[in-house]
Amino acid sequence: MAKKTTKKKTGKKTAKKKASSSKRSGAVSKERDKVTCTKIEAMATSVAKSSLAMKEPHVEIPIRSVSNMKYNAKKRILEMGTNTQRRELFNVGQARKFMQMLLVGKGCKDLIAAEKTLSLRGMYYMSLHTIEGTTEKTFNEQSESDGILEDLEVTIDGLREELHVFAKKRGTMVGNITVVDNGDEINCRRMGTGGYAIPSICEPSVIQFKECTADFILHVEKDTVWSRFNEDRFWETHNCILTEGSGQPPRGVRRMLHRMHKELGIPVYCLLDCDPWGHYIYSVIKQGSINLAFESQRMAIPDAKFIGIRSEDYDRCKLSNDVKIALNERDITRAKQIMDYPWFADKKPWKKEIKTMLANGFKMEVESLITKDISYVSEVYVPERLAQGDFLD
């Protein structure tokens, strides 16, 4: 069983005090709002000054790609580098995105002033209109505004939550913890079959932890597997918190996991598929995302452990040929890329794991364990791994 750790508990008076000050439509604190508004205004002022000085208006945007990403071996997380790209108004290929960025910046400033939040879809519609005198729309589709919003985040060194924008809820939690969500007390021990929907914005001004007695967090890849563990009351019999991220976990789930791990001092174990995509999900939880390396400090969990499912489990668990899913060329290419990541490159157990999967020529889903027994994964597989401390790091 996982080693029991000492956890911080928030008393009732403190929790009530925090709860009473957090009724702001799920937004962050007023102090952070002031800082964010100042940054947006500074960006706009810089553009205006360039125009008045008869110079080409532009913004400098940090590059969000693997070429501008570095792995901090000491912190064990991904970090964004210092390279930027210049986005200019008078450049035909950049003018549209330049104007979109200022438009989204204004929308976010208006949201902050109103002390309200808006979904990514809502921000798209808030910024959508046809430019006067033309048939040109400001955005053709939501993916455009989503990308511009991320550009705005890195440009002003802010966060989506600080811009009062949230994503669709995707992720669930249940277990031995009570949280205060925007002033409402949520006992995650009494959430029925559906569980507590982890919100997109999980900042301390919105979510507080009131009581936690759990020994660890078990994060599973999919809601189908989560439902099996919840129905079997795994979180109750093994004193833990059970979460899922519906595939690659969104920012809200990663932020929640990070905060519970750091603030409550409990370990995180990941139960994911035995395929390159499961391995990548683990990489994102552990080291951070390449595309969002600027957020790793507040989301990555370097001490997270991979509990399975693993390549050796086909023989170890005596699974049948029916569970094999042949690797395709895309899988093979992705696996080799992951094996060369600097945070995996010097870890022999991970090298062996990926090489074994490639040698097997097939991948497996966590659900494959159902062929042993409906509750084999929750009653045998995970309890054995926990008892033996059998993880990949």
Image: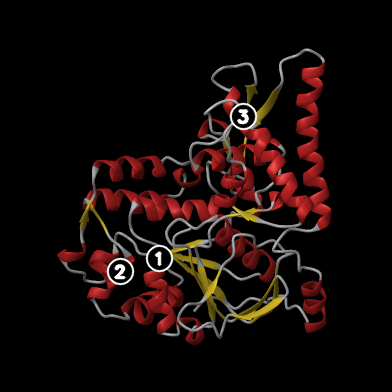
- Which SS class for mark 1? loop
First in sequence: mark 1 or mark 3? 3
In front here: 80 or 197?
Answer: 197
Residue 154 shows in the view: yes
Q: In this view, does 261 lie to the left or right of 289?
A: right
Residue drawn at point x = 81 percent, y = 29 percent: 45
First in sequence: mark 3 or mark 2? 3
Q: Is residue 363 left or right of residue 157?
A: left
- Camera-near label (2 vs 1) is 1
Q: In this view, does 331 lie above or below 117?
A: above
Which residue, given by chain and number where applicable, does mark 3 sit on? 132
* Residue found at the very far left of the displayed protein: 321
Q: Residues within 10 Å of mark 3 (few under 14, many from 20)?
A: few
For the image, the number of numbered tags is 3
* Residue found at the very far front of the displayed protein: 133
Q: Are marks 2 and 1 in contact (CB under 8 Å)?
A: yes
Residue drawn at point x = 35 percent, y = 64 percent: 309
Residue drawn at point x = 63 percent, y = 55 percent: 118
User: Where residue 185 sits: x, y (%)?
Assistant: 68, 79
Which residue, given by chain and number where applicable, does mark 2 sit on? 367
User: Where residue 271 sits: x, y (%)?
Assistant: 42, 66
Task: Report the colour scheme.
Answer: secondary structure
Which residue, given by chain and number where applicable, does mark 1 sit on? 222
Residue drawn at point x = 65 percent, y = 20 percent: 89
